Structures are given as C-alpha cells and as structure tokens.
Image: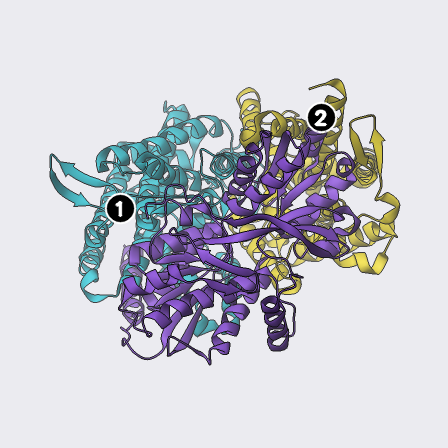
Chain colours: A purple, B yellow, C cyan
Amino acid sequence: MRTTTSTRRTALASAAMLLAGLTALGAQAQPSSGPIKIGLMLPYSGTYAALGTAIENGFKLYVQEQGGKLGGREIQYFKVDDESEPAKATDNVNKLIKRDNVDVLVGTVHSGVALAMAKAAKDSNTLLVIPNAGADAITGPMCAANIVRSSFSNWQPGYAMGVVAGAKGVKKAMTITWNYAAGAESVKGFAEGLEKSGGKVTKDLNVPFPTVEFQALLTEIAAQKPDAVYAFFAGGGAVKFVKDYAAAGLNKTIPLYGPGFLTDGTLEAQGAAAQNMLTTLHYADNLDTPRNNAFRKAYALAYKSNADVYAVQGYDAAQILGAGLKAVNGDLSKRDQLTTAMRKTTVDSPRGKFTISAAGNPVQDIYLREVKGNYNEFRSVAVKALADPARGCKL
Amino acid sequence: MDLATFLVQCLNAVQYGLLLFLLASGLTLIFGIMGVINLAHGSFYMLGAYLAFALAPLFGDWYVARLLVGVALAALFGYVLEWAFFSFLYERDHLQQVLMTYALILVFEELRSILVGNDVHGVAAPSWLSGSFRLGELMSYPWYRVFASVACVVVALGLYGVVHRTRLGMMIRAGASDRDMVRGLGVDIRLLYRIVFAGGVALAALAGMIAAPLSSVYPGMGSSVLIVCFVVVVIGGIGSITGALVASLLVGVVDTFGKVFFAEWSGAGIYVLMAMVLVWRPEGLMKRGV
Amino acid sequence: MGSEAAGAPRDAAADGSAASPVDATPDTPSLPDIARRETGGWLVPAAAFVLLCALPIVVAPYTLDLVLRIAVYAIFALSLELLVGAVGLVSLGHAAFLGIGAYAAVLGSGDDGAPLIPLLLLSVGAAAAYALAVGALSLRTRGVYFIMVTLAFAQMAFFVVHDTRAGGGSDGIFLNAKPVLRIGATTLLDLGQRLPFFYTVLAALAATYAFLALLLASRFGHALGGIRVNETRMRAAGFSTYLYKLAAFVIAGALAGLAGFLLAVKDAAVNPELLAWNQSGVVLLMIILGGIGSLRGAVIGACAFTLLTELFQSDALLGPLAAHWQLSLGIAIIVFVAVLPKGLIGIGARWRSLVRG
C-alpha cells in the first residue's frame, strides 16, 4: 500500500512536470517581411564535419558577395547538426521546420539524412536546397517543385566513368562499394555507362558500411580477373581501399576507376598507391577558368583555406536560391514563381555554367581527372551536359 | 573457386579468426572467472586501436616496442578500472551489470569523441612489414597480415603457458571452476580478479593495436566487434579458452566464405552458426573450465 | 528471495543447476502484491489518460510529436516489462521485435499504402513469429548466456535489414502512404491525419497497459511470477516452465511489434538503428529507470528517459555539453543504477527510509 501511494505521487509529479515542460516548447509564427529564415542542417560533427563547414562557408560567401541579402531581404540563419545520422534525421529536420519555422532548408551531406529531409520538406511544403547529398531518389521518385539540388546525383559521375571505361575497351568489370544508397546508385550509373559500349559488370561486391576490411573481396577480385574495377568509397574508406588494392598487387594488372570521391581529399594519405588513377567528377580543383580562379581566391581570402567541391556546391546553392528570390523580389508567398525561377536559372558556377533539370538536378559537364602527385588534375571532359535520367520523377 | 583462391581465403579466415580469438579470450576469462557480463569489452579493443594511432608518431618503426608499451598501458588502465568501477559490479545482478557497462560504453565513446574526435584514421604498418609477397599467380599477400597471425599465435601459446603452467594460471583455473572454494582456501580473490581483469583488457587492447592497420580506426569500431565476440564466447563456452579458439576459427571461416558466397546475407551467417550450435549444445562447444 | 545468497557473485549458470534461472531484482515482491498493484489503483492511470486526451488542444505540434514518441516507447517498455519484471528474463535483444514490426509495416505498405487491420496484423505477426523462433532457441540457455544469445539474434535481424537490398540498407526505407481503415468507400480512420493518429496511439497504450495488467493478475501471470522466483519449484509442481516462458516471450515480442508499427507510421520511415543493440539497451534503461516489477514504472521510465535525453541534448540548458549528451547520459545512468536500483518508483520508499534513519 505504501508503494502504491508513492507510485501515485511520483506519477502525478511526473505528469505535472511533463505538462509544464511541454507547454513551454512552442514556436511563434513569423511575419512575411523581414529577414528570410534559412535553416542549415549540416554535419557539424563526425566524419563529414569538414564538408559541412565547407558548404556553409561557400553558401555564406555568395550571400556576402550580394551584400548580405538575397532578393533584397536579410538572411537569418538557424543551424542543426545532423551528425550524419539517418536515424535522427526526421527529428532533427522537424526542429527546423516545426520549432524554428524556417522558410528555406539547406542540407545535407549524407544521402540517408537528405532523404529524410526531402520527405519532411515535401510533407510540409518547405523549400529545400541540397548542397551535396546525391541520392538519386531525391530528384527521382521523390522529386518536387520545392526541392532543388546544387550538387550532383550519385548516378552522374558513375555513368561518366562507365563511358570512359567503355571507351578504353573494358568488357568485363567488377564493382565494389559500401552497402548503402550512394554506393549502389553510383555503381548502377557505372554499369549503365559501360553498357553503352557493350561492356558488362560481371559482379557487384559489397562491404557493410562503415567497415573497411576488404581482404576476402580483394581475393575474390583477383580470382575473377575482370578488365577493370569500379570502386565507390569516400574519406577513410577510400584511403584504405586504394592502399589495400595496391598492397594486393592488383593495381598493376587491373585498373581501378572511381568517382572523384575516391581520391578527393585523400591523396596525401594514399600516396603512391593512388598515382595515375582516373576518376570522374563535376569539378576539378585546378580548373583554369576566370570564374573558378576568382572564386578560389575569394574563398581563400575569407576563410584561410582552400575551396573544394563542397564549397562550390554550397556557393551554388546560394546562387540558385538567390536567382529565385530575385525573380519574386523576396516575396516568399509567390511560391510557384519562385520555384520556376530557381529551375530556369543558368548557374554561373566555378565548375562551369550549368542548368537545372525539371526534376531539380544540375545538368553539367563531368570531367575526367588523373592523379598526379597530390592533385587530381583535369584531363578532359568525360561527358558534356550530362543529365540524370530522373527515373520515377513525375514532374 | 579454384584451389589457389580457396587456400588464400582460408588464410584470410584464419587471420581474422586468430585476431578474434585474442579479443574473445579476454572476454571469456572475465566472464568465467568473475561472472561479470561486460558490454564495454569492445571499448577496450577501441582503446587499443586508438593507442596504436596515438603512439605511432612516437615509436615510428619500433613496432614491437609500440605494442608492448600499448599493452602495458592498457593493463594499467584495466587494473585501475577494475578497482574503481568493476569491483562494485560483482555483487550486483546481471541486469544492473548490463546497464552499468552499457553506460560505460556511452561514456567511453563520448570521451573518445572529445579527446580524439570523430574522424576515421588510418594507421600505417611499420615499414619493415609494409610490403607484400606474391602468392603464386593470384595476388600479393601483405606481410603485415602474416605478422598479425603469428603474433596472435604467439600470444595464444603464451596464454596457454600461463594458464596451464604457472601458479597464477592454477588459481585462474580454480577460480573458473569454483570461486567460493578458492576464496575459502585463502587466495586473495580481489587481487586475482584485478589481475585477470587487467589481463583481459590488455588482450583486447592488443587485438585492437594489431588490427588497427588492417581495419582503420573509427568511431563505433568497438561495438561492431563486441557482438561477434559474444557469439564466439557463446559458441565456445563461457570460461573456456580452448573453446574460444575453436569458435573464433569457426567464425572466421563462416564470415570469410560467407562474404564470397552469400554476399549481402553474409552478415547473418555467424548468427545462424550460433543458432545451430545452440540447438546441439546450449552451453557451448567446450565444457566450462578453461 | 532466500535462494539468492546476498553478496555472492552469481555463478554463470552454465550447468543450469542453480536454484533460480536468471537473476531478477534482488527484492522480489510477493505474488499477491503484484496482483494488487496491477489491478488496484486505476485512478492514476485513468486520470493520466484523460489528461493526455486533452493534450492536442493545449500544446504545439512539435510537443505533440514528443508526447507521441513517449507513448510509443511506453508501449515498447511495457512489453519488455513483461519479460524482465514479471518473468525475470533479461533480454538484450528486444529491439529486434520493435524493428521487425516497424519494417513489416513499411514493407507491407508498398507504394500505395495498405489497409490498417491487415497491416497491423502483419507487423504484430512478424514480430511474434521472430520472437517464437528466437525464444525457442534462447530459452534453452540461462543466465548470462540468455542475455548474450538474445543480443546476438537481435543483431542477426539488424544485419538482415542493414546489409541486404531487400531490407533496405543502412539508410532505411520510407513509408509512402500511411495505413487507413476503410469499410467500403467510407474512411473510418486515417492514420495519416494527426489527431486520429494521436488518439490511436493513446488507445493502443491504454489497451496494452490494461491487457498486461489483466494478464499478470491471471493464473498465467501468477505462474510467471512463480517461475521468476523459483523455477525449479514450479517445475516440481508440474508446470512446463519452458512453454510458459516461451509464451511470455512471444507476447512480449508481439507487443513490441505493435510499438514498432506505430513508430513506423509516426515517423513514416524506418532504419536499421531501430534494431541496434543501443535500442535494446535504451528500453532496458527505461524500465529500470521507472522501476522493475511495475507496469506504471515502465511508462514512467519511458517518459523520464525521453525527457532526460531531450534535456541532455538541449543547447539552451547545457551549452557545449549538449553535443556530448551521451556522456552526461552515461554518467547519469551509472549514478542512477548505483544509487537507485529500484528506479523512480522506489524514490518514495527510499526517501521514507532515509528520513526514518
């Protein structure tokens, strides 16, 4: 009986605390003029923290160049660290949408998190600009007028690499990647590009994310003896794979191809193992154009570090948003006009001019690069004005 | 699959299994002797890996020295941890042990995040071990992996020697069979526990140090390996080191060949193995008692 | 209670001959107390229920999401309470059933959504089926083995959804259309609408609570209690304890599947983390936080734990420490388990005993 009374009291006290706490967490509506609320949901911690920072820097650089305003209105930033965790993504994005009531969402790096953001943006009809995550589905089955991407789709660099491999006479290839959406989509793009010239991917190998133990699969590759191997890894995984590939002696007999992520930011660690590797990406650091040179200079001046593809994507995200806001003079209520203008703009990007497909993805040149020393050097244009097929998009 | 490939895959399987054995032997000792279920064992593995990363610039190519220093540091850490935290767990029931060691994992992961950050780090093998040798026509096999396997075998022999040929080992075996009797016979059980715990931590850390160049150093590496460790201990039998060895090799084989033949379903392979063993022998392959 | 020698560390029951199968809480209440606690005192739960029903009028949408999350986790915690509190089986793999229920709901919905009742039955059924398989194998083991084996089987399920194309991979899958209850052309209940969903979850919580209370008060529940206290004695009395434990395991799994179904509909997404052992650890924490051995404790624990994590993550209150909230949480758990092994429910009794000296 004693226990029952104390239970009752505890329960009532908890309920009271709960109620008090909950009613305190509310949000107010915002006026239609005044600053535009932009919610940045990026990785500020974890493996991708540097990418998140680069994207934010690029974005803010463009806004700064426009005098701190887009469409004539000031910008107010809200930030949420998504920790690159898809499991928490829905909760995190709801903090921006429901708690902070942002007008525009910008994010993110990890495809899984971005998918959750896209879903939430679709459900709540919030504007979303994606400055990196390449999940095909976002400009595929999940496409929407209020979602636009300033980066790439996972399919694009893969497809371009497949075309290059086919041109080099590859008939049988194997692919290897982490078992997640980005990897699967990149590999699929490669297979399609290769098939264009009659080649075929004979086997797809998978490694659970984020493990980097490749030994058994490298043995399998050695046993199967394909003409080439296409690998999608990023960051630490990319470093390990390229080194292990060389340690197994495979780089001498079976060329290794991959999208730019295999060798971006990793060359110092990869060293000799990565030399002369060919990769494809929509950007190359040493693109010698006036636009790129000016951008890199401005970025270095503002942030004391070198711009990379992520900074470019953040910069272009702001450009696209800015173009839309200019067309409606900052009036967010003119939503249809705004989103149309965002789609119709030609973006003068440091990577070169590009347009945006109806599904919301950049239509851009993909460059072929070769590793020389610690740089990915531009070699040629692998595919010009490549558009993602946007399968499943009903726009 | 031709013979050459089969043999190489067997080599891969044995190398993985031996490393797993190092980790599992520590866990099974702690389980068997102290009866404490320790979810934080994977964190000691992670500790070893990060130690390898941190000590690398200090030791350069003096690899064996680096291993020894790392093991000593880990043993010391284990000794202190047992005194400060684990000794309070013996009296508690399994649920509380589970929860407190689970909380310990959270604490360790966050401390790691604060101290070392969340990046993935590569650890280079020492230059005298960084080459590969040709395995016939097929491929090259890195020397470091050979070193790892040999190191594990050496440690396994050493462990056998300690457990079966020394006084300490005698007390360990006795403690594994009947804890209360050992206490009744006047052995300082607290000191014994502390030594065994420190030993278990040292073994786990050594496994982590050896594995660091093979699997890189990344957040969460402890958790992923811990559960495989549990499976090994369940299959092998709690408290049995021989059982841990047999089970580790079995798991190595299933895992390696599973990756090749079953691709995406291979992750579940070792659990199917565990289920089969449980149907046949619910207490593991080897009888309890080291 | 006398069978657990105070202070002596439990020998891992590898030979199974120990008097009690698995360590339950040191202080096991007697059967009449459990029955009385569970069926008596309906006032507080009923009052809380009424209060919750009125909530949508008062609070903001973001807060309502929080309440929904607490309610779903309360169902999850209640399901584990049956295993740990009533039967004394410490399962470290309970998240598997939550995850399977959730994944079944999403996979079963396909692209166009599915009718409510069949989808619910699919979720609960899938979870119950897996519980049957896992239980049949795990209950052959005892003590520490049982804990590890349940963990391992949960991990197996985790790998299936994490690694395979069929399972959706590490990013998880989205629910494209929420289930609807329709008869002919009329829509009776659309879970895609906020208010109907809220009341559905509340109803599920109330139903689960009532069901478990009645179950524990029944003969079956008494038998479970007896098994927890002394399984050998129960077996001697003629009960086939393995079947009783298996039944409890399956029921617990099914209820966790229900929680998973609701979670999938709420978030419109599932991902492998739902089956990760972190999740299993979290739900164990919830019930120990609230206090083992009481259904009310499970609900309170779910509530307290969720609020605690929100608290530790809030920048406003904790500043830079908020980013490392797991550290605060870990330390809090250790202190809590060490100081308050009986959970929040035990606070009253402990305070009283402290005061009395």
- Does residue C175 appear to the left or right of A350 in the view shown? left
Nearest to the observer: residue A279 or residue A263:
A279
| Looking at the image, residue C295 lies above or below residue B10 | below
Q: Give how far across and how far down residue A347 sits, in percent.
A: 47, 63
Q: Is residue B17 left or right of residue A294?
A: right
Say which quarter of the image contains residue B264.
Answer: top right
Same chain, labels 1 and 2: no
Q: How many numbered badges does the structure rendering display?
A: 2
- Element type at mark 2: helix
Query: Residue under circle 2?
Result: A223
Closest to the observer, A100 or C129: A100
| Three-letter code for the amino acid on which mark 2 is drawn | Ala
Any mark on residue C38, and which? 1
Q: Residues within 10 Å of mark 1 (few under 14, many from 20)?
A: many
Q: Quadrant of residue A6?
A: bottom left
The numbered dot on residue A215 is none
Instruction: Give the Cα separation between the discs numbered 1 and 2.
Output: 64 Å
At label 1, the amino acid type is: Glu
Task: Label 1, secondary structure: give it.
Answer: helix
Does residue A256 appear in the picture of this structure? yes
Q: Position of residue A85 (x, y in %)?
A: 49, 54
- Residue under the image location 12 percent in, 35 percent down: C183
> In the image, which is nearer the foreground, mark 1 or mark 2?
2
Residue C26 in view (yes/no) = no
- Nearer to me, A301 or B110: A301
